[in-house]
Image (cartoon, grey):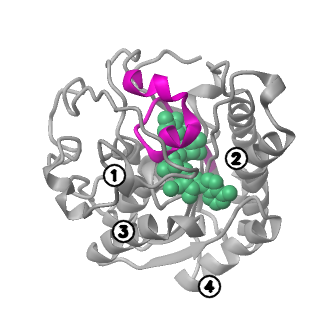
Amino acid sequence: MTDDRSTAAQDAHDTTTDQLTLQNPVTRYPDITPPKQDQPEPGLDVDLRPLSDIGEHSYRGTGRLNGRKALITGSDSGIGAAVAVAFAREGADVALNYLPVEQEDAERVRDIIEAAGRKAVLLPGDLSDRAVCEKLPDDAAEALGGLDILVNNAGKQIAVDNIEDLSDEQITDTFEVNILAQFRIVKAALKHLQPGATIVNTTSVQAYQPSPTLLDYATTKAAINTFSKGLAQQLAPKGIRVNAVAPGPIWTPLQVSDGQPKEALPEFGKSTPLGRAGQPTELAPAYVFLASSESSYVLGETLHVNGGSPMP
Ligand code: NAD
Ligand code: MG
């Protein structure tokens, strides 16, 4: 099913209008009705139908991260890829972590970063492996010549109807990738982070409104929120700021690789006040804001990017 991403500019869901142009959020993207589809976990962006928008043809940088060096986990596809594209266009060099099977998606993101004149470093590795987490920040800092921004974005989401059918292996794996990896990567990254450095963790609307089919996933997302708020206080005196972003329903490969029940896909995102799913590039400005110095007095915050669902 893989085809040439160069056709993406013509895809109805890959806009060429940049994020700074005045536009109606209801109609910025069409209200998609994704066909039922299935990909083996973790899923590939290049095989998603309709294609998502990671900002390749739309995100316009304004120098907000000039000279920064960023490590982003799960940055081959979806939200992480959109953040990587935005960071590069804002002037940052970027180290990309992803699973080895996602090499094709990662190379596409690398090419977009290099086209922006920035450095891209590919660091594949499975974050359910503690040793990989502990080594990742060192590899990123060595390849980039330092580290200023850490985005903990990798996530695993597998829907299961009944807790009786939720295997111990899945529970453990979801916790390893979604939250334990964040502890381990932060611990290993700290020696590289100087005052002014920032950490942004990806949580979810699921931390506040857990779906009955996502018990393990939603629980890790609540933990990420609490981790971020506690860590923010701990690292504040060092001049390192920690925040989180809580996406709502965003059209990414996570959703078609068992993240949602198949029959739910055509309705994905339609119950939000905006009436549509979000596109990955609509998340990017939130990460840019929290990663850059313009958010210097913002710590321990969770920024909701969810199409309008009210959150506490
Ligand atoms: P995605 O599938 O594009 O990205 C998730 C990435 O996680 C994958 O690309 C993969 O590289 C990485 N990953 C998964 N298991 C891994 C492992 N064992 N080791 C290393 N990397 C691994 O989907 P996305 O929706 O962009 O997800 C990004 C983040 O956004 C996740 O934390 C997800 O929980 C969160 N989120 C997504 C939505 C949504 O609706 N799409 C909503 C709320 C939160
Ligand atoms: Mg991926």
- Image depth: mark 1 or mark 3 in front: 3
Q: Is label 1 in a helix, a strand or a loop?
A: loop
Residue beneath the point at 68% across and 72% down: 136
Tag of residue 167: none
Residue 257, image x and y in percent? 53, 43
Residue 206 drawn in magenta:
no
Q: Which residue is drawn at 59% across and 62% down?
A: 197
How many residues crowd around disc 3 within 10 Å: few (fewer than 14), some, or many (20 or more)? some
The magenta segment is: 242-268
| Comparing labels 2 and 4, the label whose residue is closer to the camera | 2
Q: How many labels does the image show?
A: 4
Q: Earlier in the sequence, mark 2 or mark 1?
A: 1
Q: Name the residue under label 3.
A: 108
User: Percent position (x, y) of residue 251?
Assistant: 40, 38
For the residues labelled 2 and 4, the Cα–Cα distance comes to: 25 Å
Residue at point 44%, 50% (across, down): 78
Mark 1: few, some, or many residues within 10 Å (few <14, many ≥20)? many
Residue 118 found in image quarter:
bottom left
- Contact flag, marks 1 and 4 (Cβ < 8 Å): no
Q: Is residue 244 visible?
A: no
Under mark 2, the amino acid is Asn
Judged from the image, the secondary structure of the residue bearing numbered disc 4 is helix
